[in-house]
Image: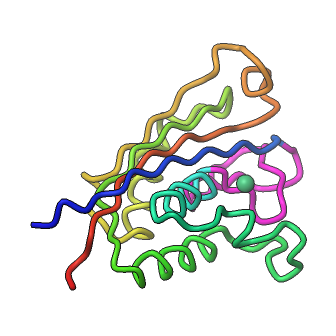
């Protein structure tokens, strides 16, 4: 067995807006709040993508997918994740596990954690048991605590795939 492992960490934060749907980890969350941003604002997938790139020693999400790229305006972040995974898999890495935390004052995400986990399992093509989705508030502190933004922290491990 190869001992070749890489740890990746990723973080992202997006402003809460009222005129867009909320998408987290590729899952549409019902309600009247969404996230701003050049793409669909999926803060979970953006943090995940940066963790993947970081673990593989590749340029960050902003270099891969520049904000000014008109082709990416409003696009589903699942498209970005697919491209990132293609690059990662091409380098013979596979995802061992993902551990993430979503910080949101509202909506209450506890009932969506399972759906987000299943969505990530499908997208990354690993077992749901290898994915942890945690959600918490920011206890009223800072922009997240005031409900003005949603943030996400991701940690993951890449390992060498079959040659
Ligand atoms: Mg982002």
Q: Identify which residue, 29 or 162, lies in the foreground.
A: 162
Q: Name the magenta segment's main secondary structure.
A: loop
Residue 23: within the magenta?
A: yes
Residue 71: within the magenta?
A: no
Q: Identify which residue, 10 or 39, lies in the foreground.
A: 10
Q: Identify which residue, 89 or 133, lies in the foreground.
A: 89
93 vs 145, left or right, is left
Query: Residue at the location (35% across, 54% down)?
Result: 157
Task: Note whether 75 is above or below 24 in the view shown.
Answer: below
Split into quadrants, the picture shows ligand 1 in the one at bottom right
19 vs 29, left or right, is right
78 vs 97, left or right, is right
Residue 71 location, x and y as percent? Answer: 83, 83
136 vs 149, left or right, is left
Query: Residue at the location (46% across, 42% down)?
Result: 100
Instruction: Work out which quarter of the rendered image holds the N terminus and state it.
Output: bottom left
Query: Residue at the location (41% across, 68% down)?
Result: 124
State how many labels appear: 0
Over which residues does the magenta segment extend? Answer: 17-43
What colouring method underlies this structural image? Answer: rainbow
Task: Note whether 1 is above or below 32 in the view shown.
Answer: below
Query: Residue at the location (72% across, 15% down)?
Result: 141
Residue 18 location, x and y as percent? Answer: 87, 45
Residue 70 location, x and y as percent? Answer: 89, 79
Residue 90 location, x and y as percent? Answer: 42, 84
Instruction: Work out which quarter of the rendered image holds the C terminus and state it.
Output: bottom left
Q: Residue furthest left?
A: 1
């Amino acid at each position: 067995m190869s001992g070749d492992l890489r740890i990746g960490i990723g973080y992202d934060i997006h402003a809460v807006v009222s005129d867009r749907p909320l998408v987290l980890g590729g899952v549409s969350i019902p309600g009247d709040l969404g996230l701003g941003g050049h793409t669909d604002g999926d803060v979970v997938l953006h943090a995940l993508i940066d963790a993947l790139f970081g673990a593989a020693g590749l340029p960050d999400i902003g270099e891969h997918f520049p904000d000014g790229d008109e082709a990416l305006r409003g696009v589903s972040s699942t498209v970005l994740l697919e491209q990132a995974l293609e690059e990662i898999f091409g380098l013979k890495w596979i995802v061992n596990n993902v551990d993430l935390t979503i910080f949101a004052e509202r909506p209450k995400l506890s009932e969506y954690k399972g759906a987000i986990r299943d969505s990530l399992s499908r997208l990354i093509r690993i077992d749901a048991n290898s994915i942890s989705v945690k959600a918490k508030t920011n206890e009223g502190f800072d922009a997240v605590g005031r409900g003005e933004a949603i943030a996400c922290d991701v940690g993951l491990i890449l390992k060498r795939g079959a040659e």
